[in-house]
Structure formats: C-alpha cells, structure tokens
Image (tube, rainbow, N blue to C red):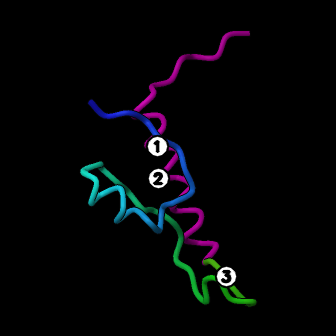
Amino acid sequence: MLQALACTATINAKHFRHAGGPVTCHGPEARNIRDIDEAVSLASMKRVTVAMAQLMVDWCGVEPATH
C-alpha cells in the first residue's frame, strides 16, 4: 500500500523510484541552479502554477463557496 510522503527531495526522486515508489518532478524552466545568479522563467512559473492548481482541483475536487 502506498503512503503519502511530503518532502523536499524532488531532485532526489531517483531514490524513491529505486525503492519502488511513484515519483514526479515538476517545476519551472531554470538556469544556473544552486549558483549566485540562479533564476527561473516567469512564464514557465505561471504554467507550472496553473498545472499544479489544476492537478489539485482534479485530485481533491472542489466544493462551491457558501456565504
């Protein structure tokens, strides 16, 4: 049985994969990662944000707001 695990090891996904777990690694286009001038593309950050929001809606569902 799979268990949920939240962690910051996305770039180490291979370790979870080798242990038999499902993995995903999703993020914006980046350059010079772990360097003094590390940067991400704002356009790709927007695409990632929309994709992640849609994933949450699809996975969790939504309920209408009540006031």
Q: CA distance from mark 2 to mark 1?
A: 5 Å
- Check disc 2 and report its element: helix, strand or loop: helix
Residue holding disc 1: 54
Q: For the residue marked with disc 3, what is the amino acid? A: Ala
- Check disc 1 and report its element: helix, strand or loop: helix
Assess disc 3: are there few (<14), some (14-19) or many (≥20) residues with their C-alpha within 10 Å of its C-alpha: some
Residue holding disc 2: 51
**Quarter of image, res 33:** bottom right
Left or right of 38? Residue 45 is: left
Answer whether residue 62 is magenta in the image.
Answer: yes
Q: Identify the magenta region.
A: 41-67
Q: CA distance from mark 2 to mark 3?
A: 20 Å
Q: CA distance from mark 1 to mark 3?
A: 25 Å
Q: Disc 2 or disc 3, which is closer to the eye? A: 3
**Quarter of image, res 1:** top left
Looking at the image, which residue is at 56% across and 80% down?
30
How far across and how far down the image is residue 2, in percent?
A: 31, 34
How far across and how far down the image is residue 38, in percent?
A: 68, 84
